[in-house]
Image (spheres, rainbow, N blue to C red):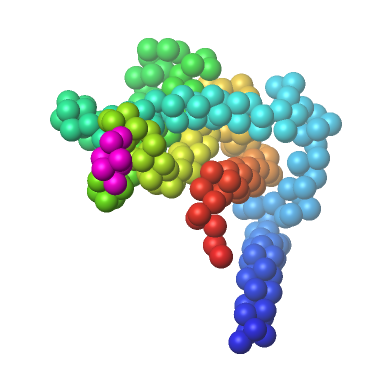
Amino acid sequence: MKQRNLFLEILYAVLPAVSIACLLVLWMGVSGNRPDLIPTPAETWSRFADTFDKPIMRLSFFGHILASLRRVMTALLISWSAGILFGILIGWSRTGKSVFGSIFNMLRPIPPLAWIPLITIWFGIGETPKILIVVIGSIVPVIVNTQSGMERVEQLYLDVGTVFHANSRQLLFEIAVPSALPTILAGIKTSISTGWMVVLAAEMLGAKSGVGFLITRGMDSGDTALVLVAMIAIGIVGALLAVFISFVERMICPWLRKK
C-alpha cells in the first residue's frame, strides 16, 4: 500500500512536466509543418529576447506586464473591498437583499465587455476606464460567493453564539464571516482570473502599454511571434497569480489544508 501511494505521489509530481513537454512537442510539430501559421519555439524565444533590445513604446516586455498587473491589482483592491461588503449586505441582511438583490441580479448577467462602449464614451480611453472595466468584471464573483457563503452559515453556529449572549455584531463578524471565509476566498480566486482576462481586452482598445497592447501591436503588424510571446506571458502570470492566492488561502484557512 505504501509503495502504491509513493508511486502515485511520484506520478502526480511528474505529470505536469509531461503535459508541458507534450504541448511543446505538439507546438514544434505544427510550427514545423506550417511555419506560416505559427512560429517555432526558437523564433518565439528570439522575439522575446528582442523585446529587451528593442523596447516597444519605450517599455521592456516586463514593463508591459507590470503595467497590466498594476491595472489589475488596483481594480482588484476596489472589487474585493466593495464586493465583500456588498455581498455581506445582501447575504446577511434580509432588508439589504430585498432592496439591492434584484438590482444586482439584473446587472450581473451583463458581460463586462458590453460596458466598454459606454465607459469609453463617459471616461475616454485613459487609465480610469480600463480600471473601471476590470472592476466591473471582477467584482461579480466576489459578490456572488460572499452572498452564498453568508447565506449558508450553519444555523447551529449562530444558535451557539446566541446561547452565549453574542450580540448582532459578534454574530456577524466573529461567527458568520469567518464561517463564510472559504467561500469568500473562492470568489477572490475567481475574480483574479476574471480581472486578468478583462484587462487584456480593455488594453486592446486604445492602450499604449500592457500585454493586451502587445497582442494588438503584433496583430496589426503581422508579428505572430510577438502575439505568441504575449499569450504565453498571460498564461504564466495567470498561473502564478493562482498559486499565490492558493498560498494565501492556506495561510488564512489552515483547516482547508489536505492532510
Instruction: Between residue 20 and residue 166, name the one nearer to us.
Output: 166
Image vertical order of residue 1 relative to residue 180, above or below: below
Residue ranking furthest to the right: 53
Q: Position of residue 105 (x, y in %)?
A: 22, 35
Residue lying at 21% horizontally and 27% vertically, measured from the top left: 96
Q: Which residues are magenta?
A: 160-166
Q: Please say if 150 is above or below 126.
A: below
165 inside magenta stretch: yes
Picture quarter with the C terminus = bottom right
Q: Please determine whether, in this image, residue 171 is positioned above or below residue 39.
A: above
Residue 74 occupies which quadrant of the picture? top right
> Between 250 and 215, which is closer to the camera in this rendering?
250
Residue 25 part of the magenta-drawn span:
no
Residue 256 x, y percent position in the rendering: 50, 55
Give the residue at x 53% y 21%.
Answer: 206
Quadrant in which the N terminus is drawn: bottom right
Percent coordinates x, y for residue 179 in the rendering = 38, 45
